[in-house]
Image (tube, coloured by chain):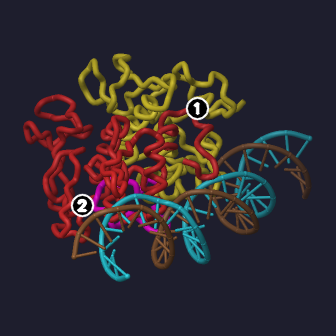
Chain colours: A yellow, B red, C cyan, D brown
DNA sequence: ACTGTCGGTTCGGTCACTGAACCTTCAGGT
DNA sequence: ACCTGAAGGTTCAGTGACCGAACCGACAGT
């Protein structure tokens, strides 16, 4: 976590995990990466995060193997950050954290997460109650719920209004 | 989160949750509360957290309804912090976060979590693979694993070496 | 009266985060 | 050749959170 001192005294996997993803903004960057955000500027406008902090987080997450930095065009050189298996493995954590947030502090449903092959809304841990199986992250369909602003300012939020699968790269329509 | 600015621009339950439990140390305090730690001094020595930060976290968690402050003796006045249902509801999140930490950054198993009625080790989301049911948090047995220091310095860690149920108040032997 | 415990508060120093400005590379238009 | 704009950063001053140590008040035991 690198805030003066780490959690080194803790003999605990949770503390170990928090050293990696416990800093401010980090889990939100991973969430966006799972939503299909891949480019520096898209993270920037969607999160409203300071540029320096975003650069630091992307570097840390890349170094920890949670994102993969990949060049997608040579001239001008442009890289995108794609979530790795290690990052995808954070989905159950993010799912249960989001569920907790909505149940205890949210009023209305912001997004639905469904099993794409059957349309059933996911259970608490990302499983499909109908199929009684763990749903692969790539098979999770994200749909806007009633609580979501129907006309957000930034293009990334607008792109996220369309139903889409997790991990599927986000298509930004410029203006 | 109150670090200059909150995550207010985020329409997301995850961001909402992180505003409550996303600060440094907060989730570790909740983890300890689930382990049965209840007293200021026990949190202090077990976490190695600065006193002022601990006081602030306990106050925030109490205000958010995650812990409940309860007087357990009148003279001198002493309070204990007991985890509430809202705090207990964070167990799946902590479980999956800990699992992620161990699978991706830990070498050896530090603790086993078992279904007390059948002894089976819990699945990824805190469910019992044998009983095919969600295990209530109070029925989770915590046992030390091979990676745990067998003779830790602080009495709280020593008390946590004995197998015990989650939520069960921790008994500190003042050695 | 002295000592020790518990549960804090106070305080100076350090470090991370914030927001704004600036920089570089390159593509496209004129 | 020049200008403009986009993308992806870096730099920097200011602020606020965190750190560690010291201090404090109430009370129990001796």
**Please, what secondary structure does the residue beneath circle 1 have?**
loop
Q: In the rendered image, which quarter is residue B54 located in?
A: bottom left
**Please, what secondary structure does the residue beneath circle 2 have?**
loop
Q: Of tags 2 and 1, which is closer to the observer?
A: 2
Q: Chain of mark 2?
A: B
Question: Residue drawn 62% across and 37% down?
Answer: B9
Question: Residue drawn 40% across and 54% down?
Answer: A18
Q: Name the foreground residue: B117 vs B83.
A: B83
Tag 2: Cα neighbours inside 10 Å, few (<14), some, or many (≥20)? few
Q: Is residue D10 left or right of residue A84?
A: right
Q: Chain of mark 1?
A: A
Tell me where the magenta segment starts and ends, as one range: A1-22
Q: Position of residue A9 (x, y in %)?
A: 33, 67
Asked if residue A117 shows in the view, the reply is yes
Residue B20 vertical position relative to residue A75 in the rendered view, above or below: above
Residue underneath mark 1: A171
Q: Position of residue D27 (x, y in %)?
A: 35, 62
Residue B89 vertical position relative to residue D29 in the rendered view, above or below: above
Q: Name the foreground residue: B126 vs D10.
A: B126
Residue underneath mark 2: B107
How many angstroms separate mark 2 from mark 1 (CA)? 39 Å
Contact, mark 2 vs mark 1 (Cβ under 8 Å)? no
Q: Is residue B23 left or right of residue A153?
A: left
Q: Name the foreground residue: A169 vs A60.
A: A60
Asked if residue B109 shows in the view, the reply is no
Residue B14 vertical position relative to residue B150 in the rendered view, above or below: above
Question: Residue drawn 35% across and 66% down?
Answer: A8
Residue at the far left: name it.
Answer: B118
Q: Position of residue A10 (x, y in %)?
A: 32, 62
Tag 1: Cα neighbours inside 10 Å, few (<14), some, or many (≥20)? few
Q: Are marks 2 and 1 on the same chain?
A: no
């Amino acid at each position: 976590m690198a805030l003066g001192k780490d959690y080194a005294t803790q003999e605990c996997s949770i503390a170990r995990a928090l050293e990696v993803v416990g800093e401010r903004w980090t889990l939100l960057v991973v969430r966006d990466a799972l939503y299909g955000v891949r480019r520096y500027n898209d993270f920037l406008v969607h999160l409203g995060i300071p540029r320096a902090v975003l650069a630091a987080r992307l570097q840390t997450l890349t170094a920890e193997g949670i994102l993969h930095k990949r060049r997608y065009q040579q001239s001008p050189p442009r890289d995108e950050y794609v979530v790795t298996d290690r990052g995808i493995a954070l989905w159950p954590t993010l799912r249960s954290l989001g569920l907790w947030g909505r149940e205890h502090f949210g009023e209305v449903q912001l997004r639905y997460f469904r099993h794409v092959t059957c349309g059933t809304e996911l259970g608490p841990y990302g499983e499909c109650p109908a199929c009684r199986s763990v749903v692969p992250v790539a098979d999770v369909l994200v749909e806007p719920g009633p609580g979501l602003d129907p006309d957000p300012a930034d293009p990334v939020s607008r792109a996220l209004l369309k139903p889409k699968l997790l991990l599927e790269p986000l298509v930004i329509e410029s203006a």
